[in-house]
Image (cartoon, coloured by chain):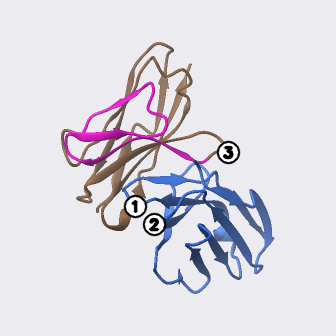
Chain colours: A blue, B brown
Amino acid sequence: QQPVQSPQAVILREGEDAVINCSSSKALYSVHWYRQKHGEAPVFLMILLKGGEQKGHEKISASFNEKKQQSSLYLTASQLSYSGTYFCGTGGGGNKLTFGTGTQLKVEL
Amino acid sequence: DGGITQSPKYLFRKEGQNVTLSCEQNLNHDAMYWYRQDPGQGLRLIYYSQIVNDFQKGDIAEGYSVSREKKESFPLTVTSAQKNPTAFYLCASSADYHVQFFGPGTRLTVL
């Protein structure tokens, strides 16, 4: 089953913050986050592993709650370049990932 | 430069024809994947391969076939049995911790 992402879409003004959630009905070993620009390939952002620490860079970070089988992606002080569709991919321990349906993020001036 | 290449970028097919999409990587990754993406939807796994000469069905394998004769190559054939093949097809590869790197994609349109 696909993980559920929320919200489905969000519009931000430049400089605002956003949170994108990813929830799975299955036990998770890892959560991956990707961003895809229209017509392009998804680009890897970060991975969170079971038992690992919260990952992130200065303005994009993520958390992983293993007990709740949920992950959240935090975008701080958004920039125009953050626009795109964000996907979470969940791993159950093997090499296979199951991707969510995506969250469309648009950052406006 | 290391990376994943897919060809062609755009492909048009008549109904009833088989077509093969190419995927090559020079990242020395063991695992390779094929995904299908429909407008406004996520990525659905078609097939994946963890080593040469071995591959497994994903969630939507019906109407597709693959081969993995070389580590670098993982071609996907869309057969006439696939009822609705028009979509964006993405190939990916991975090494450690299952982080997947994607190729630029092939957009297939059935005429």
Give the magenta part as a residue range: B42-68
Name the residue at 69% across, 68% down.
Answer: A20
Quick check: do tags 1 and 3 share a chain? no
Closer to the chain start, of discs 1 and 2, is: 2
Distance from disc 1 to disc 3, alpha carbons, whole Å, reads 28 Å
B11 vs A14, left or right, is left
Image quadrant containing the N terminus of chain B: bottom left
Same chain, labels 2 and 3: no
Q: Looking at the image, which is closer to me, A68 or B53?
A: A68
A23, A6: nearer the viewer: A23
Q: Which residue is mark 1?
A: A93
Residue occupying image coordinates x 62% and y 52%: A38
Q: Secondary structure at mark 3?
A: loop
Residue A34 falls left or right of residue B30: right
Q: Is residue B107 rendered magenta in the image? A: no
**Chain letter of the residue carrying label 2:** A
Q: Dot 2 lies on which element?
A: loop
**Real-space Cα separation, disc 1 to disc 2, in angstroms:** 5 Å
Q: How many marks?
A: 3
Q: Do the residues under discs 1 and 3 have CB atoms within 8 angstroms?
A: no
Residue that numbered label 3 is attached to: B40
Circles 2 and 3: CB atoms closer than 8 Å: no
Closer to the observer: label 2 or label 3?
2
Residue type at mark 2 is Tyr
For label 3, count other residues whose C-alpha is less than 10 Å away and answer few (under 14), some (14-19) or many (20+). few
Residue A22, above or below A19: above
Q: Amino acid at mark 1?
A: Gly
Tell me which amino acid carries mark 3.
Gly
Percent position of residue B48, x then y: 36, 44
Q: Determine contact: label 1, label 2, CB under 8 Å.
A: yes
According to the image, label 2 marks what residue?
Answer: A29
